[in-house]
Amino acid sequence: MDLKHIIKEYNTLCEDNDWQVFHTPKNLASAVAVSASKILQHYQWITEEESITLGRIPQSRERIEAEISETFFYLLALANRTGIDFEQAIANKARKDARDYQGAPD
Amino acid sequence: MDLKHIIKEYNTLCEDNDWQVFHTPKNLASAVAVSASKILQHYQWITEEESITLGRIPQSRERIEAEISETFFYLLALANRTGIDFEQAIANKARKDARDYQGAPD
Amino acid sequence: MDLKHIIKEYNTLCEDNDWQVFHTPKNLASAVAVSASKILQHYQWITEEESITLGRIPQSRERIEAEISETFFYLLALANRTGIDFEQAIANKARKDARDYQGAPD
Amino acid sequence: MDLKHIIKEYNTLCEDNDWQVFHTPKNLASAVAVSASKILQHYQWITEEESITLGRIPQSRERIEAEISETFFYLLALANRTGIDFEQAIANKARKDARDYQGAPD
């Protein structure tokens, strides 16, 4: 899947719905944190072992999937509104990790 | 950029470094929430207006960029460890949003 | 109100209900973060000005009040399970703040 | 310790330092979430068992103690700025919990 395409479509969606007025970086940073905590809520009282099998329960997996996606799109919107090239950002991080942890050349 | 490629490389990185032992869904859900809050920390005491221009300060933008990327890769790892196809998940969400907010056909 | 009394009663409640098994510090730290984010959820899309008057809406105030209390009791449980004297901890912090910000003697 | 006294002193501290301008409910809700996540950061990669003994390491305990106190005072400020009587709120919650979980009379 082409990430560039996903990003472009999402930005168009935000503009078409005039979400920009709510989508200030301050608000989006809160939205990322809030949706991330909704994911965590599924795991707060279960053991690490139980957490490994939670994804096998379709209802739980679907809710976690929806919240992961929501968190992702808020991250995307935050990057966009902060002048950060999301694609470039994760490519840089992947390269840095490869260098730091896999002995890949600079 | 091909998201499939990024995902595959990241999963290889995790396996090669034996991170799986720490990367239980429970731990990764905490890591997503913690790194999301690090982003929020930049914005907690500034106004919405100030938050719009924060990204113009190179040092702030670079730190926010690093934290957005970190949050993204933890989301990716969590999806992977929960049996969720990340690519499919965000494609589904994009389709759902288009349907809900842009009158796109089902 | 005597904080010592509140703390003692809460610890008894936890013991009487055998919550200790779930109340590991790791879990309680997640519970604190999750309940804190539920508070934040009320504020994520409104302006700072709107946030000042939100407490005047009885239904919102009651929900925020319940979530503030919930977060407080998880903090209390976490302190208790970590060998931290909660009362002493906040007394120390109050003294430190007075020293740092009000010129109070050491 | 008298909670009423702690609350009064903290409110005076905030007023004397003109923190009110930053202490909007929206900002304080973020501050609560951010400081709560700093607590969680200590626990994200350790097991529940390890989390039980973490408090025995003085350096860790001191940092967690400082972050618990910080989260508590932000909760206090948020309650104050939202027209919530903190003392009353936790008394209500304690009474409700006793009723729900200990068969105490209404």
Image: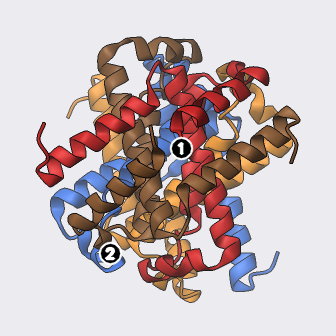
Chain colours: A red, B brown, C orange, D blue
Q: Considering the numbered disc 1 on the image, is that residue within a helix, a strand or a loop?
A: helix
Q: Which mark is residue D47?
A: 2
Q: Is residue D74 left or right of residue D67?
A: right
Question: Which amino acid type is shown beneath numbered disc 2?
Answer: Thr
Question: Which amino acid type is shown beneath numbered disc 1?
Answer: Ala
List x then y, in percent, for residue C42.
70, 40
Task: Answer with the quarter of the image where residue A65 lies.
Answer: bottom right
Task: Answer with the quarter of the image where residue A72 lies.
Answer: top right
- The residue singled out by tag 1 in the image is A33
Q: Is residue B69 left or right of residue D21?
A: left
Closest to the observer, A44 or C58: A44
Residue C79 in view of the camera = yes
Q: At 60% from the left edge and 25% from the top edge, which residue is drawn?
A: D24
Closest to the observer, C32 or B71: B71
Q: At 25% from the left edge and 40% from the top edge, which residue is drawn?
A: A95
Residue A56's place in the image compared with C96, above or below, is: below
List x then y, in percent, for residue D67.
35, 48
For label 1, count other residues whose C-alpha is less than 10 Å away and answer few (under 14), some (14-19) or many (20+). Answer: many
Q: Chain of mark 2?
A: D
Q: Is residue B92 left or right of residue C15?
A: right
List x then y, in percent, for residue D26.
61, 30
